[in-house]
Amino acid sequence: MSTPKHTPGPWTYYHYDSGIESHWRIEDHTGVFVAATSYCTKGKEAEYVKPEAALIAAAPEMLAALEKLIDRLELDSLIPGQGELLELVLMTSKIIKKARGE
């Protein structure tokens, strides 16, 4: 497992509304800004965008879990030479590289 280049998790999200602008804000565990969704109005549009903010906020923890899973599978030699599990491992490894920016 390599050292992450992204802001470490966990991340949280909340709806930010200054009266002028409104969006879902994602912050790290110390309260430092990480990302925001596109601007949205109140009500239905804000609720429509909320799942996107939740997914973004979960990214560091999902990546960490996937990395541990792949490390464990490789350590235990549970990856067979063929089959669906191998496909899933390869797909997951590709997604991990994408998330790392590799």
Image (tube, grey):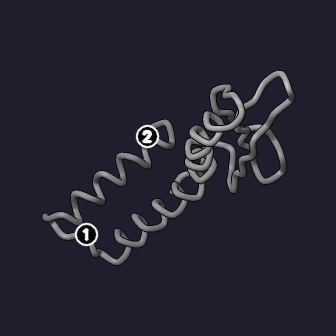
The residue lying at 61 percent from left, 33 percent from top is: 45
* Disc assigned to residue 25: none
Which residue, as the protein is rendered here, is positioned at the far front? 43
> Helix or strand or loop: what does disc 1 sit on?
loop
Give the quarter of the image for residue 56.
Answer: top right
Is residue 31 depicted above or below 21 in this figure?
Answer: below
Please name the residue that numbered disc 2 is placed on: 98
Answer few, some or many: residues within 10 Å of disc 1's Cα (few below 14, many 20 plus, some between 14 and 19): some
Q: Residue furthest top?
A: 20
Nearer to the camera, 58 or 60: 58
What is the quadrant of the C terminus in the image? top left
Q: Residue sitting at 54 percent across and 52 percent down?
A: 2
Residue type (three-letter) at the residue carrying disc 2: Lys
Gap between marks 1 and 2, in whole Å? 21 Å
Q: Residue furthest left?
A: 82
* Rendered location of residue 28, percent (x, y): 75, 48
Residue 93 point in image, percent of width and height? 36, 52
Q: Residues within 10 Å of mark 2 (few under 14, many from 20)?
A: few
Image position of 54 (left or right of 82):
right
Is residue 12 left or right of 59 when viewed as pictured? Answer: right
Residue under the point 75% across and 29% down: 22
**Number of marks present in the image shown:** 2
Q: Which mark is residue 79?
A: 1
| Callout 1 amino acid | Ile
Residue 3 rendering spot, x and y as whole percentages: 60, 50
